Image (cartoon, rainbow, N blue to C red):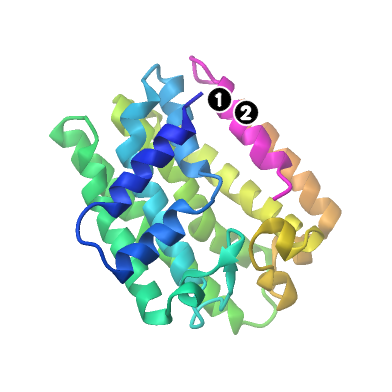
């Protein structure tokens, strides 16, 4: 297991480096206040599986978390989902203002590519990490998922296949990224196709569980808005039904565990994380 307090300290240092200002304060406000740090932990757990000291992944994990947080800041904006609460506190644009929130998101995204280059690996692997961050978070990754999600808001008769497609990009891509980055750092690029399959299954499972919680928990309990449910947005739960959605989560867990069994090494940390993601209640 990794000392997450040490990672939090590292993350705070990285976001606060350089010029002080209102935008930097907004970046730090959104980045260091809360969050389960699932993506960094997936990276650390995969490095542990490969026999590496997880702390070598601190720069890359910070970069991924910066990209994830920037996406949340922009997703909460009035032009997107218009959510006023995130991680149990006012969203960035509510705490500051819309213009500052946009710049804070931009700042976190660009800072991520600077921080990832501090990873203690050779130049070729650094290029691989930068390429992975761009591919999985950009217009062919997470951003494409956001585009599909926006289109879906005005679409009629959204199908289950449509929701799978949206969440393949919007959610699963950033949950696959930690596995891919860990494989690059460890010099195990041949494992990336398997990690991509695991990341897809985990991402869809994670989103289905999110939809279940939106249906069964209050926004106060979750620490975020349940706007998808309140706005009658088509989700896995609305299209599959609650009980079928719960069964699908368990099915994906079995599929993930089967794929993980092909790896040799210490799987305990990774299995604990996946078990939490399956059974989480917040």
Residue at image location 70% in from the left, 43% down from the top: 280
Please rate how many residues cluster around mark 1, counting C-alpha atoms within 10 Å: few if below 14, some from 14 to 19, many from 20.
Answer: some
3D distance between C-alphas at marks 1 and 2? 5 Å
- To which residue does mark 1 refer? 269
Rendered residue at 58%/43% (across/down): 202
- Of the pair 244 and 126, the residue shown nearer to us: 126
Asked if 254 appears above or below 162 in the picture, the reply is above
x and y percentages locating residue 263 in the rendered image: 50, 20
Q: Is residue 200 left or right of residue 8?
A: right
Give the residue pinned by disc 2.
272
Q: Residue at x 21, y 30 (%)?
A: 121
For residue 200, say whether it is visible: yes
Q: Is residue 270 above or below residue 164?
A: above
Residue 147 visible in the picture: no
The residues colored magenta run: 259-282
Q: Position of residue 3 (x, y in %)?
A: 47, 28
Seen from this angle, which residue lies furthest left?
A: 123
Instruction: Estimate the x, y position of residue 224 in percent, counting from the top left.
Output: 63, 63
In reply to whether residue 269 is colored magenta, the answer given is yes
In the displayed structure, 146 sits above or below 247; it is below
State the image coordinates of residue 190 (x, y, percent, origin top left): 35, 28
Q: Is residue 169 left or right of residue 163?
A: left
Q: Which mark is residue 230?
A: none
Name the residue located 36 percent from the left edge and 44 percent from the top edge: 11
């Amino acid at each position: 297991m990794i000392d997450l307090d040490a990672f939090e300290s590292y993350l705070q240092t990285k976001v606060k480096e350089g010029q002080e200002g209102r935008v930097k304060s907004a970046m730090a406000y959104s980045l260091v206040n809360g969050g389960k740090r699932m993506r960094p932990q997936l990276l650390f757990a995969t490095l542990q599986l490969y026999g590496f000291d997880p702390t070598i992944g601190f720069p890359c994990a910070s970069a991924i978390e910066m990209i994830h947080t920037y996406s949340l800041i922009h997703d909460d904006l009035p032009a997107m989902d218009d959510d006023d609460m995130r991680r149990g506190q006012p969203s960035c644009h509510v705490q500051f203002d819309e213009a500052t929130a946009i710049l804070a998101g931009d700042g976190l995204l660009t800072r991520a590519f600077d921080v990832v280059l501090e990873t203690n690996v050779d130049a070729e692997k650094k290029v691989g990490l930068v390429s992975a961050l761009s591919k999985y978070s950009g217009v062919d990754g997470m951003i494409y998922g956001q585009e599909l999600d926006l289109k879906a808001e005005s679409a009629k008769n959204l199908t289950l296949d449509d929701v799978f497609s949206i969440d393949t990009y919007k959610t699963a891509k950033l949950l696959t990224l930690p596995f891919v980055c860990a494989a690059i750092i460890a010099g195990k690029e041949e494992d990336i196709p398997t990690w991509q399959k695991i990341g897809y299954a985990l991402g869809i499972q994670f989103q289905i569980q999110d939809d279940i919680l939106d249906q069964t928990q209050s926004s106060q309990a979750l620490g975020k808005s349940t706007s998808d449910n309140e706005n009658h947005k088509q989700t896995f739960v609305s299209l599959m039904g609650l009980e079928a959605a719960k069964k699908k989560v368990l099915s994906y867990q079995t599929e993930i565990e089967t794929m993980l069994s092909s790896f040799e090494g210490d799987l305990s940390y990774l299995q604990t994380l996946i078990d939490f993601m399956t059974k989480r209640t917040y």
